[in-house]
Image: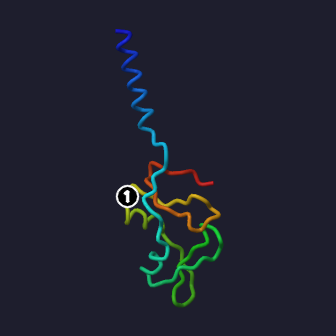
Amino acid sequence: MKKLLIGVVVVALLTVFLSIPTHTAQAGNLDLNAICQSQGMTLVLLFNNVFGWACRDTSGTDHGMDLESYCQSRYGSQFHATYLNPDKPNSWGCFPIQSKMPIK
């Protein structure tokens, strides 16, 4: 009986250990240009980092983008927007929520 219990515990631990993701799966890059164009605006980079993007309307006014909504409408409600490197403007991506990475 003791060996059976140990065997069950080992199998349970292996099941949990093997189900932990070893990498972050990215669904896709955010097409920032397409987001702006869909609203009749132009994509502009105001600052050379991930927070430097804006959509500029025809009057020259800059607007923010709802990247979270874009990811969820494109890939489903289980995805969110995040960046991989704050110093690289093009490092935005859509990731599954369970793989949310800490933002530095």
User: Is 59 in front, or is 13?
Assistant: 13
- Looking at the image, which residue is at 49% across and 73% down? 32
Quadrant in which the N terminus appears: top left
Q: Is residue 28 above or below residue 13?
A: below
Q: Residue at x 49, y 83 (%)?
A: 41
**How far across and down, in percent of the image, does residue 2 sit?**
38, 9
Q: Which residue is mark 1?
A: 77
Task: Name the foreground residue: 24 vs 78.
Answer: 24
Quadrant in the picture for residue 53: bottom right
Q: Is residue 22 above or below residue 10?
A: below
Residue 72 image point, x, y percent: 40, 62
Quadrant into which the C terminus falls: bottom right
Instruction: Determine the secondary structure under disc 1.
Output: loop
Figure label count: 1
Q: Amino acid at mark 1?
A: Ser
Image position of 50 (left or right of 16): right
